[in-house]
Image (spheres, helix red, strand yellow):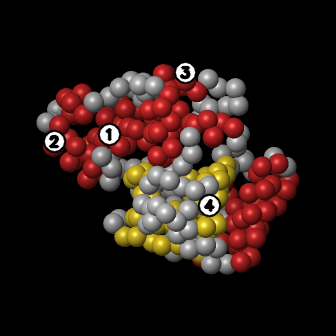
Amino acid sequence: MKLDNLEYLTIHKQETEFPKHYHETFCISLIHSGIEVININDQNFYSEVGSITITNPYEIHSNPLMDKSIQLCFDTIYISKDLMKYLSNGKNITFLNRKINDSSANFLFIELKNAIGTNNTKQIELLLHRFVNAIKHYAQEKKGEYLALDFSSLDHIKSYIDMHLTRKLSLDELAKIAHINKYGFAKNFKISTGMSPMNYILMQKIFSSKQLITKNSALTQIAFDYNFSDMAHYSKAFKRYIGISPKAYQQRL
């Protein structure tokens, strides 16, 4: 069992809303205080303290804050689609219910999160099996594989963006490559992906740069390499998509 991509993140007092984004993994959170809001296809799902919330791989969503005066605190565990498939006896599963209220699942979530923090592989595997067995009763089998976003006729644009994430890309530049005016390009891009071009680019920059952060990384150099104007600009963008600053993320590694 490959646990390389298994990760958890703790968010204390979320202060900023998460814009539209997606994860290549299952994003599974346990709410400790406040109320989490997940917006999918312009529909809000509200989850209170003690709830486990789930988004599926490549599912575009945002997380508005219902009330900034209410402190939202939660833990999130990221499980790759391949690992979830393995744990589900070779079947792809999908969660249509966004909220699970199950005290046994909550207990196993916390035990698993703590085990991930210790790097005890055997304990992680045991608890991971138990946790997935507890929550998969709330899922259903998915036909076919999880696929990345459908860029339709914009596949060459996606490839161009992926190859030039460290550059400062503009709407005019991308529209020129697509041979369409920038307003038509932005409209077509959002129809195909559900996200605006610049939001998508910023999200990809953050997720790509996050993979380079180690305990000894020079964060200022990473910010420079991805063409952020300064560390403050990078930190603000990082926090919008990850929930904590790059420095705080590095300290938790």
In this view, 244 is above or below 91: above
Tell me whether circle 3 and circle 2 mark residues in contact (CB < 8 Å).
no
Q: Which comes sooner in the sequence, label 1 or label 2?
A: 2
Q: CA distance from mark 1 to mark 4?
A: 28 Å
Question: In this rendering, would 69 be left or right of 218?
Answer: left
Task: Bin the neighbour count of mark 2 within 10 Å (Cα to Cα): few under 14, some 14-19, many 20 and up.
Answer: few
The secondary element bearing badge 4 is classed as strand
In this view, 60 is above or below 99: above
Task: Bin the neighbour count of mark 3 within 10 Å (Cα to Cα): few under 14, some 14-19, many 20 and up.
Answer: few
Going by the numbered disc 1, the residue's amino acid type is Met
The secondary element bearing badge 1 is classed as helix
Q: Which comes sooner in the sequence, label 2 or label 4?
A: 4
Q: Which comes sooner in the sequence, label 3 or label 1?
A: 1
Going by the numbered disc 3, the residue's amino acid type is Gln
Q: Which mark is residue 74?
A: 4
Q: CA distance from mark 3 to mark 2?
A: 34 Å
Residue on which disc 1 sits:
198
Instruction: Identify the residue at horizontal 76%, vertical 60% (top origin).
Output: 112
The secondary element bearing badge 3 is classed as helix
Q: Which comes sooner in the sequence, label 3 or label 2?
A: 2
Q: Nearer the viewer, mark 3 or mark 1?
A: 3
Q: Which mark is residue 221?
A: 3
Question: In this rendering, would 82 be left or right of 198?
Answer: right
Q: CA distance from mark 2 to mark 4?
A: 39 Å
